Structures are given as structure tokens and as C-alpha cells.
Image (cartoon, rainbow, N blue to C red):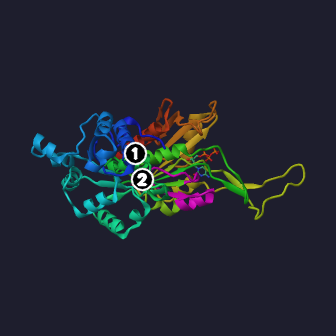
């Protein structure tokens, strides 16, 4: 998973109240606090008394560079509103790990400790990541309390299966800290400059089957498409990623898994009427085998011929589905090995795009599996911007800046 460009990370400058309760997994909250802090959030850790028996508050204080709250009455003495001030200031409340006991207390609205008062006093969205023994997790009491919290708007990051503190293996293990942080990011992205936008990004090289075990494909890793999807999510868009890679995207992004160009075309066309922006970052095969052998093709003779036919040109098809004003903004990519800008300009015009992102794929080492990319973006009026070699997530943000500018200039619907 890529990390957002520092200035664009929805965690930057935001206040996160991190509730830590008395689960053996409490030590993992140190990693959560660390990641949130490194990404620019101001983290106020609120520990239950039980949690302080498992992890020293000093660990959190050293990592967040902020005082840790656990004794409500100490805070009351310090300031009149001490027990609610963290809740009032928070942009997001994260409770991780959450024990069965703390989930029950939060569902009931009990306020006998700092976490309880913080949860009641805050208007910020809540994220809860349970961790406990399997039977406790599956118990109707726990599930009932979680249903109450969900109904109240909390986001639950469910535990996973794995080794538990009891020595047994089963459901109840805290979700990975990076997943919890990613969901926090998604929640804080609401209200970004792409809020209310519905976007589709395609990613990866299509796989055109020859027989049940072989396919024709290309070197695309899908990383640029995933970065474009993540950047849009981090700016508040509702994102669907149509992908050939099968990789899990960041939290909050819906995926549609496809293999062939025809299936990608079907998925794009099916969603096209509902979206504001289409970003075609996928490397769609231009040709696919005419026949797909039902059984594995056996070796015979010293050579073989594979007959290929043109695949549908997805951008070409959707560009005709509405004139400017009625159709979404459309961004294409051009991977070229020669005459980069000239070829990309021709594609922009031929496919009636609003923006094309051109990259030179002849560079030594290639850009496909890399985390960085050097691109030239060409606008519909023919003007272009040369970007330096940048992490793909930064290229993605530059792309969305251009899309936003085009939309503000009246393009798209
Ligand atoms: N594309 C598409 N459908 C295809 C092939 C490509 O929608 N069948 C899209 C790609 O996702 C990309 C853009 O068109 O955004 C340009 O892809 P590229 O392969 O560079 O262009 P082609 O039109 O295939 O031209 P050529 O292969 O001749 O360079």
C-alpha cells in the first residue's frame, strides 16, 4: 500500500483521540499511535485503567509527544472540563484494541472512566477495532453491543482469525494496525476537495486467455491505478477500482475484479452513467486470442501460431456515450517508447479525452513495477505539464489537481 503525499494525507494536522483498553493486544496500539503521528495526526491517547497495567502510558507519551489521559480525576483537578476536552477537540475517535467489556460500556454509554466520557462528549466519528477470545467475540452480547454501535454510526474494523493470547487459534485477533490506520484515514478523508465525486479507476494489465492455464498480458503492475484510486479516496471521492491484479485496495475502495478487456469494458460501461470521472490507468491488451482452447494446449511441432483479434477500445467506446457536458471527465494514459508527447497528443484527440498522462516506458529498469513515475500530462487544449520523477501517489495527486481544475473550468458533468 502506498502512503499519501505528506501534504495530502487526510491525517495531517487532524486530532485523533486513541482509546486503548485492557486487551493483551494493547501493545499493538503503540504501532497505531506511531503511524498516526508519523502521518501528521495529533494523537491524544486515552487509556482505561486496565490498559495501563499492560502498557506504560509513557510509551504512548514518548511516541505521540503528548500527555496521555487515564485518570479522570487527575484531569478534573487540572481543568474544569478536562474529562471532556479530548472528546470536544477530536476529529476522530479510534478505540483499538476494544475489549468485550469496553464495547459493552460504549454501547451502554457508561462514563465511569476517561474513555467513556470522551466517547460521550465527542461529536467526531468513531472507529472501533475489537480484540478478544473467540467465544467472547462470537457471543450474542458482544455482537449485540457492536450492532448498537454500528447503528449509531461507528465503523467496526473486525478482528481476524489467527493466533490468540489464550494459545488457541481463532477469530478475535486485532486487525493489523496498518489496516486500522487506513480506515481512520478513509474516515478523515470525508470533506476533501473531491467529496461527492464518484470515480472509477481501472488498474493493471488485462489477461487474455489462450487456454485454461495460459494468457497473453503485459508488464503493467497496476501500481499507478492503485495510487490514483488511493489519492481520490484520500480526497473524499467514492472510488470503484476495476482491477486485474486481485490485490486488496486501501480501505473504503470498492473493487471489481476482471481479467479480460471485454470484461473490463462491460464493468466500465455498466458504471459509466453514474460517475463523475473515469481514469483509465489499466494497460488494456490491444489484441486477444480469437479462440480460447477449452483444454490445455499440448505441445506439438516446432512452432505454433496464435491468432489474435482486436479487443474493444474501452475509451473509444465510452467517449461516444455522451458529449461534453453530459459525460464524465475522462482521463487516459499513454505508455510510449518513442515520440512520447506527439503520440499522446494524438491519443488525447482520437479518444476525446479531457486529460492524458503520458509516460516513457523505454526507461532502463522500466516504470511498471516501480513506485515512482515520470510523466507528462497533456490537457484537452493541448497545453502540457512535465512532472519530475515522483512517487506514484504524488503523480496521482497531480492528476486529480488537473481533473479538479478541468471540472472547475466547466468540463465534465
Ligand atoms: N485503452 C482502452 N482500450 C483498449 C486499449 C487501451 O481503453 N483496448 C486505454 C488505456 O487504458 C489507456 C489509453 O487507452 O488509458 C491508451 O492506451 P494505449 O495502449 O497506449 O493506446 P492504444 O489506443 O492501444 O494505442 P497504441 O497501442 O497504438 O499505442
Does 29 sit left or right of 295 as displayed?
left
Within 10 Å of the Cα at label 1, are there few (<14), some (14-19), or many (20+) other Cα atoms? some
Rounded to the nearest angstrom, the CA distance separating label 2 from label 1 is 8 Å
**From what the image shows, is residue 302 above or below residue 377?**
below
The answer to whether residue 351 is visible is yes
Mark 2 residue CB less than 8 A from any atom of ligand 1: no
Residue closer to the observer: 200 or 301: 301
Is residue 278 a member of the stretch shown in magenta? no
Within 10 Å of the Cα at label 2, are there few (<14), some (14-19), or many (20+) other Cα atoms? many
Mark 1: secondary structure: helix
Q: Hey, which quadrant is residue 335 in on the image? A: top right
Mark 1 sits on what residue? 28
Q: Quadrant of the C terminus?
A: bottom left
Residue at (56, 46) in percent of width and height: 222
Mark 2 sits on what residue? 174
Residue at (57, 58) in percent of width and height: 265
**Residue 239 x, y percent position in the rendering:** 43, 54
Residue at (24, 51) in percent of width and height: 115
The answer to whether residue 410 is visible is no
Is residue 248 a member of the stretch shown in magenta? yes
Residue at the farthest right position: 301
**Residue 89 x, y percent position in the rendering:** 20, 45
* Segment tinted magenta in the rendering: 243-267
Does 399 sit left or right of 339 as displayed?
left
Residue closer to the observer: 136 or 254: 136
Does 329 sit left or right of 111 as displayed?
right
**From what the image shows, is residue 65 above or below residue 304?**
above
Mark 2: secondary structure: loop
Amino acid at each position: 500500500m502506498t502512503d499519501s503525499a505528506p501534504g495530502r494525507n487526510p491525517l495531517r494536522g487532524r486530532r485523533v483521540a486513541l482509546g486503548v483498553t485492557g486487551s493483551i493486544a494493547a501493545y499493538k496500539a503503540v504501532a497505531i499511535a506511531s503511524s498516526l503521528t508519523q502521518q501528521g495526526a495529533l494523537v491524544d491517547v486515552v487509556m482505561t485503567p486496565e490498559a495501563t497495567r499492560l502498557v506504560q502510558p509513557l510509551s504512548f507519551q514518548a511516541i505521540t509527544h503528548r500527555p496521555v489521559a487515564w485518570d479522570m480525576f487527575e484531569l478534573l483537578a487540572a481543568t474544569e472540563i478536562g474529562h471532556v476536552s479530548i472528546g470536544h477537540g477530536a476529529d476522530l475517535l479510534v478505540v483499538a484494541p476494544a475489549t468485550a467489556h469496553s464495547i459493552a460500556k460504549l454501547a451502554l454509554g457508561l462514563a465511569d472512566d476517561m474513555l467513556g466520557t470522551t466517547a460521550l462528549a465527542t461529536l467526531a466519528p468513531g472507529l472501533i477495532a475489537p480484540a478478544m477470545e473467540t467465544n467472547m467475540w462470537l457471543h450474542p452480547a458482544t455482537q449485540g453491543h457492536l450492532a448498537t454501535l454500528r447503528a449509531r454510526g461507528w465503523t467496526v474494523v473486525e478482528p481476524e482469525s489467527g493466533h490468540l493470547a489464550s494459545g488457541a487459534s481463532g477469530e478475535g485477533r486485532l486487525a493489523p494496525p496498518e489496516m486500522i490506520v487506513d480506515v481512520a484515514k478513509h474516515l478523515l478523508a470525508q470533506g476533501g476537495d473531491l467529496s461527492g465525486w464518484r470515480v472509477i479507476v481501472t488498474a493493471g494489465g488485462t489477461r487474455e486467455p489462450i487456454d485454461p492455464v495460459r494468457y497473453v498480458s503485459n508488464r503493467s503492475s497496476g501500481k499507478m491505478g492503485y495510487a490514483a484510486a488511493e489519492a481520490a479516496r484520500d480526497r473524499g471521492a467514492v472510488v470503484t477500482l476495476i482491477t486485474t491484479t486481485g490485490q486488496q485496495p486501501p480501505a473504503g475502495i470498492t473493487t471489481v475484479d476482471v481479467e479480460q478487456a471485454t470484461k473490463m469494458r462491460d464493468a466500465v460501461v455498466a458504471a459509466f452513467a453514474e460517475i463523475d470521472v473515469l481514469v483509465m490507468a489499466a494497460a488494456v491488451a490491444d489484441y486477444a486470442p480469437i479462440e480460447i482452447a477449452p483444454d490445455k494446449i499440448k505441445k506439438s511441432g516446432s512452432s505454433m501460431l496464435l491468432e489474435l483479434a482486436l479487443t474493444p477500445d474501452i475509451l473509444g467506446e465510452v467517449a461516444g456515450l455522451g458529449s461534453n457536458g453530459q459525460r464524465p471527465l475522462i482521463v487516459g494514459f499513454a505508455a510510449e517508447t518513442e515520440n512520447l508527447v506527439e503520440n499522446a497528443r494524438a491519443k488525447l484527440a482520437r479518444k476525446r479525452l479531457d486529460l492524458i498522462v503520458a509516460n516513457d516506458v523505454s526507461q532502463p529498469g522500466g516504470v511498471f513495477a516501480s513506485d515512482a513515475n515520470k510523466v507528462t500530462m497533456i490537457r484537452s487544449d493541448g497545453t502540457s505539464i512535465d512532472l519530475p520523477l515522483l512517487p506514484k501517489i504524488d503523480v496521482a495527486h497531480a492528476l486529480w489537481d488537473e481533473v479538479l481544475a478541468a471540472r472547475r473550468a466547466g468540463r465534465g458533468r
